[in-house]
Structures are given as C-alpha cells and as structure tokens.
Amino acid sequence: MFSQVQVIWFLMRGHRLRYGSALGCLVLATIINFGIPLIGSATIDYAVAGKTLAPDTPVLLTLILHLFGGADHLRAHLWLAPVAMVLLAAFSGLFSYLKGWQAALASDGIARRLKDELYDHLNHLPARYHDRTDTGDLVQRCTSDVETTRQFLATQVMEIGNAIFLAGAALPLLLSLSVPMTLVSFALIGPIAIYAYFYFRSVKHVFKEVDEAEGALTAVIQENLTGIRVVRAFARQDFERAKFAVPNARYRDRSLRMLRLMSWYWSISDFVALTQIGLTLLVGAWWITQGTFSVGLLFAFISYLGIMLWPVRQMGRILTDLGKTTVALTRIREILAVARDSEPAVTPHLPGSSFTGRIAVRDLHFHHASATLPTDGRGALNGLSFDVHSGETLALLGPSGAGKSTLMHLLLRLYDYTQGSIQFDGHELSSLPRQWVRARIGVVMQEPFLFSKTLRDNLRLGGGDAPDPEIEAAARAACIHDTILTFKHGYNTLIGERGITLSGGQRQRVAIARAILKRPPLLILDDAMSAIDAETETLILNALKERRGRATTLVIAHRLSTLVHADRVLVLDHGRIIQTGTHAELSAQAGLYRRLWQIQTSLETDLQSELKAT
C-alpha cells in the first residue's frame, strides 16, 4: 500500500497546492461541524434544564456558554442557539463546497495530464507492441482506468484526510466531555475498521478481474464496429451476437460477484454502526436515570457518532476504490513502462535538404517474430542486397509474403533490423532519428487510412499548411481533383471514419495526392493502385513520370502494368531477389516475371475479345 501512496503522491505533482487548499477547507468544515453538537449540548443542559456550571464542567461547554453571554442570557434568548447552529452548518457547507471544488480541479488536471501522457506514449511505442496488443484494451486503459483514478483523486483522497483528521481531533474532544462514554462510543468502531481492512484484502483481486473483463468486452465491441460491413456482408450478425455474449456474460458475472461482496460489507457495517448508536443510547439512558450523565452530553455524543460513523464506514468504500485505483494504475503503468522506440545516442549532422534519395541495402535479414533468429531462410527478408540511385524509379514485384511491404516498414523504421545494413546517402538508417527519416518519405500503404476530417485536412496531413493551389495540383496528379469537385462541399467535404464514404479507388487516390503534396525525396507506393481502374492508373503513372527525377520512387505492385515504366524491376521471392532488370529485359527471359506478364496479358486479351464479341 505504501508504494501506491507514493504513486498517488507522484501523480499529484503540480496540483499539491490545490489539494492542500482542499484539505484546509476540509479541516475548517470539520471543526465547524464539531461546534454544532456543543451548542446543542450546552443549550439543553444549562439553558433548558437549568444545570449550573461546576468545576468539573467540560472546558468547551463553559466556553460556549461564555460566548452566548452565560446560561441565563441564553435561557432568555433561546433563539440564538438554533440560529448559531444554522449559521455554522451554512459555513460548514461553504467550506465543504470549496473543498470539493479544489479537489475536482486538481483531479481533472491530473486526469488530463495522464491522458496526454498515455496518448503521447502510445504514439511513440514500437510497432511490435501495437501488433500484439488489443486496441479495445488500450482504449479501456486510456479512458475507464484513467476515470477510475480521477474519481479516487477527486473524492476518496479527501475522505482519507477526513478520516485521519477525525481520528486525531474527535477522540480528544470526546475524551474531554466524558471518558467513560467515549469508551462506550468507540467500542465497535475498531471492529468496523478492522473488518474494512480485511474486506479490502479479500476482494482486491476481484477488481482486477472485473477490469480485465471490461477490457476484453471493449475489444470485442471495437473489433465488431470496425468490421461491421464485413459482418453484414457475410450475414454474421447472429454469430457476432453469440461471440459478444461470452465476454459480456463474463463481465456480468464478475461484476455481480464484486457487487455481492460490496453488499455484504455495507450490510454488516450498517448493522454494526446502528448497533453502536443503539449501545450508546442504551448506556447513556441508563446513566441519565442514575444521575451520572446528562441529556445534553448524550445529545452531543449521538451527534458526534453520526459525524464519525459515516467516515469510518466509508473506509470500506475508500479501500474498495483504492483497490480499483490500484488495479487501474497498474494497468496504466504497464503501458508507460513499455520502452519507446529507441533513438540513436549520437546522430550525424544532417541538414534539412541533405537526403537525395540514394539507398543502399546490404545483406538485409529480418523476421517479424524475432529480429535475432538465425538467417536460414525462415525470415521475411533473407540476405537482401540492392542499390537505388537518386531520382530512380525502382519497382518491386513478387508473390504475397515475398517481403515487399516488410522492406517498406524497415525503410520507415517501423521495425528495426539487426542484421545487414540500410544506408541513406551513406548514413546507416539505424543511426538516423525516426522523425527525420519519416519526414523525408512519402508513403501510400496497401490500405490507405483517412481520418474523419475534411478532404483538405486529410491532404494537408502530407503538406502541413500547403496553400490551396498546391493541394489542387497534387490532387490533379492523383486524378482525384475532378472527383472532389463533384462533391457538394468540394475539398471541405467531411468524410466518414477511415474515409468510409469514399470508394476504395478514391481513398487510394487521396492517399497518393497526400504523399505527392509532401514533396518527399523518397516516395513509396505500396500496391497503391490496386483499387484504381486501368485508365485512371495510366493517368496517374503519366503524372508520376513527369515528376521523374525529382524524387526516388519505390513502387510495389502486383499488376505489371504499374511497373512497366520503372527504371528497374526487382523480383522477390521468400525474401530474396531472384530477378532484376528492366521490363523489356525481364519479359524476354525465362522466370517468374515473364510468367506473370504472360498470364496478365493473356487475361486482358481474353477479356477484350469477350467484350468485343458482346
């Protein structure tokens, strides 16, 4: 528990003054609350019952009577007592409000900072981490777990302070009024506190089970909503509902288990608390009949019990929420503990315009499962070596799994190689900062991702604050400008999540325009025209040919028509280069390239013949 206190203290950095102010308001509110039963006790015993002051009269009651001008004056003006009690209650409420306000401001500030840190950290974690982690679980940790922490910091931290202050201030106060009655009044408070502690220890693991079950449930929902069109296309609604029912039932069962344990705690603590009040009433009434106690003092003790029993019972709630917060903070810290993408300790001097797009790859090996596996041909890349000259257009061809996209990921430093070498203009890629590398590469991935923003905002992702003429020029090069103008709001058209309101070909063309607008020294097109018709593809390729020499271009494709105009073609298979040359050279020699070329051209010929016949 001490370690959790240290973590919470660390989270409070920058907001400790607000918590200090909230604690000060709490102390003032509690002190004022202590005064209300004293006024009632003094009024009942000395103004109403006519009891006279004696040497053994508690000092605090004597002080209260002097503040009211004596027992006789208070007896003559009884209205002063209820007015004073109402005023004290009002001031207590005011300070309680200020306490809650300060604590809420501090906890909201902490939650905002924690979410910012998590979001920034997730954006800098290695691609391998995101490959093996459920998105729904990450969303759960960044939202629900942070909210659990915020609620604890907003309410229960103050309740802990309240309980500590009550234990330190109320006990001496009650002892000053009556030692025997104090012992009676505290007879069952100790057992309640002990029960709360053991309750917390017994149910702590349940909180983790509930949180993990909720994370799994969120992951299923997120996956289903992401693939909702696939679910409907295959009429799998019933299957998905049955699949959802399993984690949903697990979450329900674990939540009910936690609620049952909490209901037991509240029931038992309520019974013990009411028993304590009943015991105090019975003993106090008996002592009053014996003449050894007064009605006013009994009123004070019952009132103080009402003030104290709630915080004591709240210890169970505090410990419960502390258990939830412990689990939530553990899950949050698991993310923050993951090391970010490593950056070189010493980087070469690289002016902004130094990269010309010259690439040299030597004996490159890589495996997605582990970068340290032996290079025996089992990896995604197995001894790849080639050069790309500045301004050259290099095409990569090969069957699925040949290593084409893996090579692109390595160039972007989404993954780091440990065997072999990649050099940009003579600098080892692993020695260059990731942001520097990515700022000089324009990429269109196999599945282009568009944000739920306007088309202009999506295009400016590649060009920053590019003016409209440049945006339109890039859109024309990608053959999407005329299509955008047909939309009602043109470039201000808001597209749906992942660009779902656009067709597959439109999304690809927007992604191509976004990459062109960046004006990078290195342009990578990873099967970027698979959803584009042949005529539009020809127009885009012609536009890219006009830009030849301005940037080094790597084109990855399965359609050979996309690769015809490349300066060179590399044919990959099982992570190795099996052929290299121009389109004319490769189509003239036996091998995979010519077989693919013959298959694709024959299919196109047959299709055209059928169309003519029709």
Image (cartoon, rainbow, N blue to C red):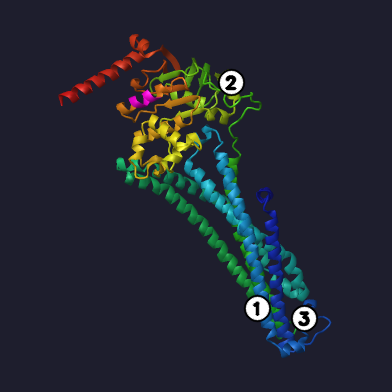
> Which residue corresponds to the image point at 51% horizontal and 43% vertical from the top-left?
138
> Looking at the magenta stretch, what is its main secondary structure?
helix
Q: Quadrant of the C terminus?
A: top left
Residue placed furthest toward the left: 613
Tell me the SS state at disc 3.
Answer: helix
What range of the chain is rendered magenta? 538-543
Tell me the SS state at disc 1.
Answer: helix
Q: Is residue 576 left or right of residue 485?
A: right
Q: Is residue 78 above or below residue 105?
A: below
Q: Which mark is residue 428?
A: 2
Where does the image place residue 58, in percent across and percent down from the top left?
79, 78
Where does the image place residue 316, in percent across and percent down from the top left?
61, 60
The quadrant where residue 426 appears: top right
Q: Is residue 15 above or below residue 592?
A: below
| Most foreground residue, 399 or 367 | 399
Disc 2 to disc 3, C-alpha distance: 84 Å
Disc with the residue nearer the chain's start (2 vs 1): 1
Q: Which numbered mark, 2 or 3, is in the foreground of this view?
A: 2
Mark 2 Cα-neighbour bin, 10 Å: few <14, some 14–19, many ≥20: some
Q: Looking at the image, can residue 385 be seen?
A: no
Q: Amino acid at mark 3?
A: Leu
Residue placed furthest toward the front: 469
Disc with the residue nearer the chain's start (1 vs 3): 3
Q: Which mark is residue 529?
A: none
Q: Amino acid at mark 2?
A: Glu
Where does the image place residue 508, in percent across and percent down from the top left?
38, 33
Q: Is residue 518 above or below residue 354?
A: below
Q: Is residue 311 above or below residue 255?
A: below
Mark 1 Cα-neighbour bin, 10 Å: few <14, some 14–19, many ≥20: few
Q: Which mark is residue 67?
A: 3
> Which residue corresponds to the image point at 55% horizontal and 49% vertical from the top-left?
145
* Residue at mark 1: 86
